[in-house]
Amino acid sequence: MKKLITLMVVLAAFSFASCKKEHECVCVSSLGTEVTTSMKATKKKAKNACEAKSEDAGGYTVTCKIMD
């Protein structure tokens, strides 16, 4: 029984660990241009970095989001 509980605790710890994976950031401009970049990071960090590339300048917009 002790071994089962220990195994469950170890598996739970691994499930909460963040791992870096390849995430694709797709940016689409108001002109219809699409640019895809790849980044290796945790999902949260990749999402924040990708969304930071979005911009709105004088009628020209670029919207970026993570595609998974």
Image (cartoon, rainbow, N blue to C red):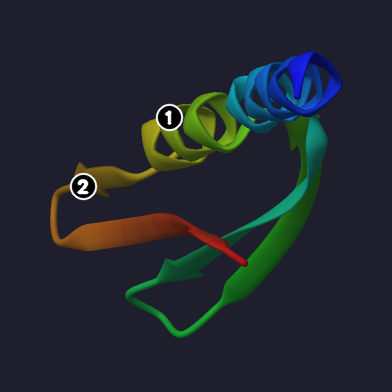
Q: Picture quarter containing residue 34?
A: bottom right
For this rendering, which residue is in front, 28 or 17? 17
> Eyeballing the image, is 31 above or below 24?
below
Q: Is residue 45 left or right of residue 60?
A: right
Q: Picture quarter containing residue 15?
A: top right
Q: Amino acid at mark 2?
A: Asp
Task: Identify the residue at horizontal 21%, vertical 44% (top origin).
Answer: 57
Q: Is residue 51 left or right of residue 3?
A: left
The mark lying in front, picked from 1 and 2, is 1
For this rendering, which residue is in front, 46 or 18? 18
Looking at the rendering, in which quadrant would you find the N terminus? top right
List x then y, in percent, for residue 45. 54, 24
> Eyeballing the image, is 62 above or below 43?
below
Badge 1: few (under 14), some or many (20 or more) residues near its Cα, within 10 Å? few
Task: Identify the residue at horizontal 58%, vertical 24% (top origin).
Answer: 16
Task: Identify the residue at horizontal 75%, vertical 29% (top origin).
Answer: 11
List x then y, in percent, for residue 67. 58, 67
> Eyeballing the image, is 28 above or below 60?
below
Badge 2: few (under 14), some or many (20 or more) residues near its Cα, within 10 Å? few
Q: Going by the picture, which residue comes out furthest to the bottom?
A: 32
Task: Name the residue that disc number 2 marks.
Answer: 56
Q: Secondary structure at mark 2?
A: strand
Q: Going by the picture, which residue comes out furthest to the front?
A: 1
Report how many numbered discs are placed on residues in the image: 2
Q: Picture quarter containing residue 30?
A: bottom left
> Label for residue 48?
1
From mark 1 to mark 2, how far is it between C-alphas? 17 Å
For this rendering, which residue is in front, 40 or 59? 40
Looking at the rendering, in which quadrant would you find the C terminus? bottom right
Q: Amino acid at mark 1?
A: Asn
